[in-house]
Amino acid sequence: MIAEYAWPIAMLLALIVMLFSGYAVGFVLAGVGIAFALLADVPTVFLSMGVQRIYSGTLSNWLLAAIPLFVFMGLMLESSGIAERLMHSLSAMTGRMAGGYAFAVVIIGVVMAASTGIIGASVVLMGMMSLPAMKAAGYDMRISTGLVAASGTLGILIPPSIMLIILGDQLRVPIGDLFMGAIYPGLILAGLYFLYIFLNAIFRPHRMPPPERVRAESFWRASMILIRDLVAPMLLILSVLGTIIAGVATPTESAAIGALGATVLAQVTGGLSMETLRRAVYETTKTTAMIAFVMIGATIFSLVFRRLGGDAMVADIFHFGDVSPYYTFAAIMFLVFILGFFLDWVEITLVVIPIVAPIVAKLDFGMASGDVILWFAIALAVNLQTSFLTPPFGYALFYLKGVDSSIPIGTIYRGIIPFVLIQMTALLLIVILPQIVLSLPTALR
């Protein structure tokens, strides 16, 4: 088998080596693809197919226009100060109890995930708001850092999520179905975080004690303030997700509505200025360009990889004979989990998923082919969320280290272990009970 698939194996090894070289991922993918096309005497005219695919699949793809709009929406929402106000009002309600700040962090994580979906901004903002208060209250920094990192990455799963948009484009799944299918898994994951905090607050309260001093405020007044602070993000979430689910607007049009709504919200709250607008446009352009270059590079790499027999090699690797299709499913999920230690979700989504998706589509799980791909996509999203948390290259861990350099990286690494296990538990639930994913899209079709 090694001799038969020498070229695709060599391509993968070259890709791994070059990724660790520090070069931009998009250029690495395209460069490795073109280099091996020349080495393997692939006709030059064959590469022209890559140009056609880049134009039709990326540059002229109307669906992908939602990406910069959602990024811009998240940056504008960050400027509006909503997250800070929510943290203050939630702390006033929950700060008196053991684990109160921890519960507030998860709630903020869910709201920010459903409003922005930008992982870096969520982790940094939540870390800056909550870590000083947790440290002052005497929280165990392992649980504090793990919770902030895990809650900040909920935006990769809870819609509107940039990753779900790219997954939908790669797997040819309607974005509306993906968004609806991700709602219950996202809430279940947040619920498991709540359960973990609750059990720690009961059995190990010394890890998250209540602060000695809290702001004196009646529960009723704190509740009213919390409701007031929740109105704006809830309206924004409903305007984006509601229009998609109701079929009133496409994901791209809904993203435009969200971008406009977040800009108006920033203006109303006094957070909009020329500097804020300049930063938002710059960061949006930079993020969109990074994703576009990776997509272009992945298109070239995948084209050459398949020409050299890479898809046949992958099919042989995941062919286990006459056994349960869950073996193949588990093997793919394990591969993605391991790759998450070293690669970002963008590379995994754009390089690995188009190759393994046809294998999954042929497996017999007793469901329609479209439902299998939808179920696979959401399970994959939960799995890919761990790539932000698993060392050595978990981005959320380094975002958090940047927020508070006094926290040892070893403390952060140990803190995320329970949350990675929780995510694996959520993934197992989705595999065992596919209706967690399928029930809402099926009901609303």
Image (cartoon, rainbow, N blue to C red):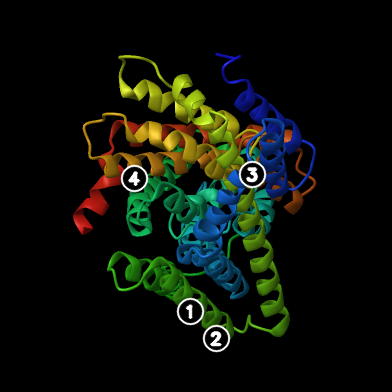
* Residue 310 visible: yes
Q: Name the front one of labels 3 and 2.
A: 2
Which residue lies at the image location 34% right of the left edge and 36% below the top edge? 361
Q: Name the residue under label 2.
A: 268
Say which label, 4 or 3, has the lower sequence index.
3
Answer whether labels 4 and 3 touch (C-beta < 8 Å): no
Q: Name the front one of labels 4 and 1.
A: 4
* Residue 212 visible: no
- In the image, which disc is placed on residue 374? 4
Say which label, 1 or 3, has the lower sequence index.
3
Say which label, 3 or 2, has the lower sequence index.
3
**Residue count near mark 4 (Cα–Cα under 10 Å), binned few <14, some 14–19, many ≥20:** many
- In the image, which disc is placed on residue 10? none
Where in the figure is residue 127, as x and y percent of width and height?
65, 54
Nearer the observer, 243 or 94: 243
Q: Name the residue under label 1.
A: 261
How many angstroms separate mark 1 from mark 3 (CA)? Answer: 32 Å
- Look at label 1 and name its amino acid: Gly
Q: Is mark 2 on a helix, strand or loop?
A: helix
Q: Mark 3 points at which residue?
A: 145
Which residue lies at the image location 63% right of the left edge and 20% below the top edge? 6
Q: Name the front one of labels 1 and 3.
A: 1
